[in-house]
Amino acid sequence: MRVVMGEENQRFASWLSELPYTPSLYGTMNIPEWIRTINDRSEFCESIYPVQSLRANDVSIFRDRAILSSRNDDVNRFNNDMAQLRSVPFHDDNPSEYLQSLSGSGLPLGKLSLQVGMPIMLLRNYFARRGLCSGTRLIITRLFNHCIKGRIISPDRRFDGIEHIISCMTITSSEDLPFTLIRKQLPIRPCYSMTINKSQGQTLQRVVVDLSTPVFSHGQLYVALSRITNVNKLIIFLPPGPKATNNVVYPEVLLRPES
């Protein structure tokens, strides 16, 4: 994380560096008063993707912002909600059946509803030498029956703005399933929202961290909060109640910083 200079951001960076190593911050912890939190879902959506910009099909807003959630089902719900607000028709594939409804970590959805101008994320390494790696974000520029064309959005100037064709791949997964699922699908998913784990390596200018469902694995809270460079562009979405959340840390797996 590269923090923008300023007293508030230095305070944020100092607090963030304490999250993994301060036992009093393990488990349930209070969010500092100087970090903005919200409880209202409509305010939450408007704060990251203004409805006016979505309906005007202003794709520039997708370049440097995202909603981060700990669970795939929350990510899918947010992606669907944001897409519904845009005044762009959907391109749907076949109606969903049971196997199409199954989803898992790193597995593309069986039923994809896509739009021109939609932000997407690659779920597999596709062509690494051209910047098409797992986690790469693109904006859809054209839709075809069995492939899409997308423009890379990346801080790496070697790849940013370059258009590529993305075709279907055969992908297998046995995670969380009693059988091996083989799916031929585009290796992408919408990414108005993304999981905290998938956000690793991303640097964003505006972030809403969805903690309505608390994080559940080691270091997730730190990863989510460290995607931002300016604490004034960070918002945490909490359920109504105390301004607190869960910080999962396993001290035994940490390397202590050198004195």
Image (tube, rainbow, N blue to C red):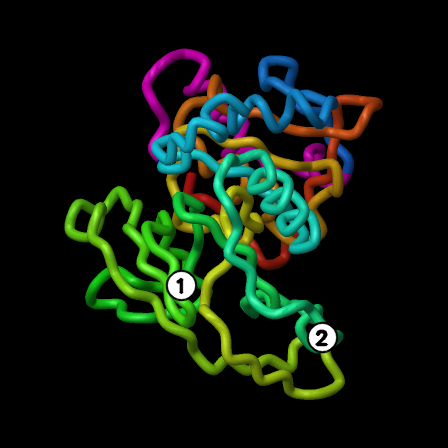
Count of numbered tags:
2
Query: Which of marks 2 and 1 precedes in the sequence?
Result: 1
Q: Residue at x 63, y 83 (%)?
A: 181
Up the image or down, 53 lies above or below 128; here it is above
Give the structural element (helix, strand or loop) at label 1: loop
Find residue 131 and report its horizontal and vertical position in percent.
Answer: 25, 60
Q: Residue furthest right?
A: 241
Which of the 4 image quarters holds residue 111?
Answer: bottom right
> Magenta segment range?
2-27
Nearer to the camera, 210 or 83: 83
Q: Is residue 168 left or right of residue 111?
A: left
Report whether residue 219 is seen. Answer: yes
Q: Is residue 114 left or right of residue 220?
A: left
Find residue 6 and report its horizontal and vertical position in percent.
Answer: 36, 13
Up the image or down, 153 lies above or below 144; here it is above
Q: Residue at x 20, y 67 (%)?
A: 129
Callout 2 amino acid: Asp
Cα separation between marks 1 and 2: 21 Å
Q: Is residue 257 left or right of residue 212?
A: left
Mark 1 — residue? 134
Mark 2 — residue? 176
Give the structural element (helix, strand or loop) at label 2: loop
Crowding near the residue tagged with mark 2, few <14, some 14–19, many ≥20 C-alpha atoms within 10 Å: few
Please tell me the numbered disc located at residue 102.
none
Q: Quadrant of the N terminus?
A: top left
Nearer to the camera, 257 or 195: 195
Q: Quadrant of the C terminus?
A: top left
Crowding near the residue tagged with mark 1, few <14, some 14–19, many ≥20 C-alpha atoms within 10 Å: some
Q: Is residue 89 left or right of residue 37?
A: left
